[in-house]
Amino acid sequence: MFDILSYGFMRRAALASVLGGASCGIVGVWVIMLGIPFVGVAMAHAAFAGALLGLLIGVDPVLSGFLFCLLSASLIGPVADRGDFEPNLSTGIIFSIVLGLAFLFMGLIEGPKAEAMRYIWGSILTVRQTDINLLALTAAAIGSFLLIFFKEILAVLYDRRTARAAGVPDKAIFYLILFLCGATVTLNLNTVGGILIFSLVISPPAAAYQLTYSLKKMHLISAAFGVISCLLGLGFSYAFNLPSGAMIIIISGLIFIISLVFSPKRRKVYVRT
Amino acid sequence: MKNKENNYNIVEMSGVSVRHKGCTAIDNITLNIRKGSLLALIGPNGAGKTTLLNLINGFSGATSGTVKVFGRKINKKTSGELRKRIGYISQEAVNAPRAPVSVYEAVSIGRIGKRGLLRKLKEEDHNAIKKAIHSVGLGGFESRPVGSLSGGERQKTAIARALSQQPDIMLMDEPTSSLDLKSVREIINIVDEIYREYNITVIYVTHILQHIPPSCGRAVMLKNGRIIWSGKHRGSYSEKLIIELYDLPETTLTGGDEIPFSDKSICKYV
């Protein structure tokens, strides 16, 4: 069964699954709890557009994707903070602009577009050692941030205004969350691609939310679901010669449906006193 | 017991105006609040009550004039530090939070800011959290998810969270406005008890006269961003004043009776 791990590319793919799945699972909890799921969509597409620009002008697509992602995060954050209008509206505008740019860059790339298509659909089997190193670095940054600032993260996810009123530096925590979200999304373009990455950020925490009343456990379960989705998706992709990105997303969707059906929240009733 | 030597102004506002998107939310207000007092800010919706609270905890800045809290000007630089001494209960406290957080964790937020970054909560923090939870009558609810509580219980959680900060000032923004009558009475009693037991200055915003805690010493009436009346809180207010405050038609109240809301009338109305 573990014969497949004798191949170097499969070992790298499995490692990318564990690192990417766990990272997406954790940042997904923050995105969902902050009520900004569309920020994830906009950032994923910004990273995708940036990667295509990188291909077009001969810059490392991961670097250009990351810069684009950060640029969109730096626009979304302050606009969401100003509260002049619904943050989802500004996110929607940024989303449509970066999607337009992505199609523009795609059209401008001459010759075969196989490399560009990789950033749409992802190809976990082709991840390089450099990608693994960056994924490990991001996962370590996310893990450290979570462990060191868990109490501040809890306060901000509970309610930003309440956190601010209590003297918690909510803005710094919120912007760090956006930054780590951007880094995770960009570096996982290789695994599931720009179109599907959003599902991997949303489905695992949504499934975890069905199973626990504890924020701490939600982080753990969501990270585990992210890893399981990536590993099982990778396994099915290898066994049945199917697209890996699509399989990862289908598995994460199935985990959500199963969690929804078997959620103890639908059985446990708190009696009001 | 309450410290009676409270003879300085904990909040000083001088010629304060706030203009936002072409509207004047606060119009040239001068207001001093004595340490250890329970002040009721009364007014209709849109009078500027919440804006006034936001000025005190630095959520928003004044367009003109100065706001001093604890003798220091509140601005972007000082607000983060000063807020650790100010408990704040927002109008939204009754809403269910999205995050799965227990009552204990929610109340601990009051200590998180006070303790500061990279510092773990200590035994004294946990003692303050437990004491605050018991003070509002939520003992036994510690592990309950806040999302599973009723609106009144969530409001008590918010009061406990602010109380765990051991603040010098407590800002309460319409804590009873969306609660049922039983919960309203409970919250009023809790505010009264907290005020009597701890040496906290309470600024209590409401648009419902009957919801003012009995210990309230002074009331300020706001309308269109201006103070239209200020003075000792009384058991009743004149019909004329109420009609003016809420822009009621002259025929709403008849007979020229005073509008009562003494302790007894709270029991009657609530």
Image (spheres, grey):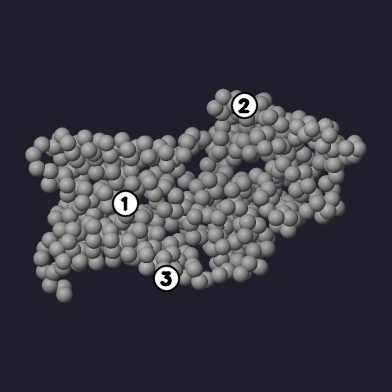
Snapshot quadrant of residue B149:
bottom right
Q: Amino acid at mark 2?
A: Thr
Q: Amino acid at mark 1?
A: Phe
- In the rendered view, tell whether residue A262 sits above or below residue B38: below
Q: Is residue B110 visible?
A: yes
Earlier residue among tags 1 and 3: 1
Q: How many marks?
A: 3
* Disc on res. A262: 3
* Marked residue chain, label 2: B
How many residues crowd around disc 2 within 10 Å: few (fewer than 14), some, or many (20 or more)? some
Furthest toward the left, the residue is A111
Of the pair A34 and B118, the residue shown nearer to us: A34
Distance from Cα at disc 1 to Cα at disc 2: 43 Å
Of the pair B88 and A245, the residue shown nearer to us: A245
Residue B36, given in percent of the width and then of the height, sits at: 73, 45
Residue A211, given in percent of the width and then of the height, sits at: 43, 67
Answer left or right for A230 relative to A176. left
Q: Depth-wise, is mark 1 or mark 2 nearer the camera?
A: 1
Say which residue appears at 31% left-offset and 35% top-offset: A97
The residue at which mark 2 appears reads as B24
How many residues crowd around disc 3 within 10 Å: few (fewer than 14), some, or many (20 or more)? few
Label 2 residue SS: strand
Q: Depth-wise, is mark 2 or mark 3 nearer the camera?
A: 3
Whether callout 1 and callout 3 share a subunit is answered yes
